[in-house]
Image: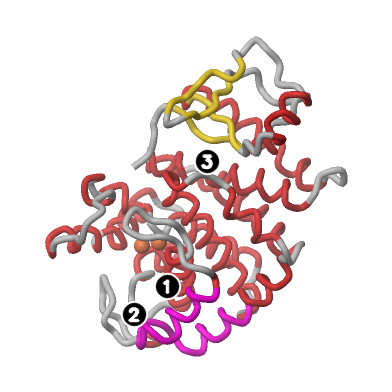
Amino acid sequence: MRDHYCRPISIASINPQTFPDVSLYTKSSGNYVLYKPHDRKFTDMDRMRLEQNFVEFLYVRTGDMEEVTRFLETGLSEILNRHDMDVRTKGQILYQTTVNYVIDVFENPEEAAKLDRCRNLVKYLLHYLCSDPTSLNALHSVADHNYYIFVHSLQVAALSLLVHDEVYGLTPDELTDVGIGGLLHDLGMVFISNSILEKPDALSDVEYYKIKQHAQRGYECLKEIGGFSEISLLAVRHHHERFDGDGYPSALKGDAIPRTAQVMAICDVYSALTADRIHRKAVSHERALEVMRTEMPGAFNPELLARFVEIITARKSTEK
Ligand SMILES: [Fe+2]
Ligand SMILES: [Fe+2]
């Protein structure tokens, strides 16, 4: 599913003055190559050279990630308030930091017990999304496709936050719970074996049955850890219900499906369609919306889907 050896860090988040002294690697034909040892400083010159070569990421060994994560998370509010940094760079750093959080929880679900960590990141995310109409456009460059599930989690959180913010008058706390549900909606995938998740061919009925368990298992895992709101928990459990009642795990129909799960179902499919997967290539924004509107009858709440299309299209058109 992913490489346990190194984690990608966007160059944008490596501030030469303050970044911790850790070794950095580049990736070349699938191998990690030392770019700088821990006792050499990363300089502005390094950054310039890498950017000229269109390198967007360096890699950090997982053993060094704790230090890097601490650095990034404590520095986030300062970074987001900086005036000398453009909105795209800020977005890259924030997205990167949030994806790192999701990776941590997927590697060790107990990490989800540190709810404050998640809550803080979601608050920054919400603030960032609302502060700039072009804020979605840094999302695609967060990491390579080996990290699909983590970037997907962030994407579903970001899209769900935007839709909830525009469609319903939620309090900041409720919005935070929506974001937490989005970040963790597929956590149950950690209980599914990699041989099924990475299988390029069609799944057998048994394999599909196992995959479908991720919604319920993610819910049970978070419920057991404790501290999560109903909004977050129900979003995780029901994000694969279909509006016509043909979904799982509970085959709920129409408005019996919790509202946040109805929104998340839409964001989930949109995010999956617009990403490269093992078995198929990404489709464009326009094609994804067309597929959802015309080729998936009964899957979604039609009014919500119409609002989603409106909101996301408005955002996309400001990106260009
Ligand atoms: Fe899912
Ligand atoms: Fe998902």
Q: Does 235 sit left or right of 248 as displayed? A: right
Q: Is residue 308 magenta?
A: yes
Q: Which mark is residue 100?
A: 3
The percent position of residue 133, horizontal first and vertical second, equals 73, 67
Prevailing secondary structure of the magenta residues: helix
Residue at the image position 55 percent from the left and 49 percent from the top? 118
Judge whether 72 appears above or below 139 on screen: above
Which badge, 3 or 1, is on the more N-terminal residue?
A: 3
Judge by depth and name the residue closer to the eye, 215 or 99: 99
Q: Which residues are magenta?
A: 286-311
Q: Residues within 10 Å of mark 2 (few under 14, many from 20)?
A: many
Label 2: element kind: loop
- Going by the numbered disc 2, the residue's amino acid type is Arg
Q: Does 96 sit left or right of 33 as displayed? A: right
Quadrant, the C terminus: bottom right
Judge by depth and name the residue closer to the eye, 47 or 244: 47
Q: Quadrant of residue 70?
A: top right
**CB under 8 Å between discs 2 and 1:** yes
Quadrant, the N terminus: top left
Q: According to the image, label 2 marks what residue?
A: 242
- Going by the numbered disc 3, the residue's amino acid type is Asn
Q: Residue lying at the far top in this picture: please name it.
A: 39
Q: Which mark is residue 265?
A: 1
- Going by the numbered disc 1, the residue's amino acid type is Ala
Q: Residues within 10 Å of mark 3 (few under 14, many from 20)?
A: many
Judge by depth and name the residue closer to the eye, 75 or 202: 202
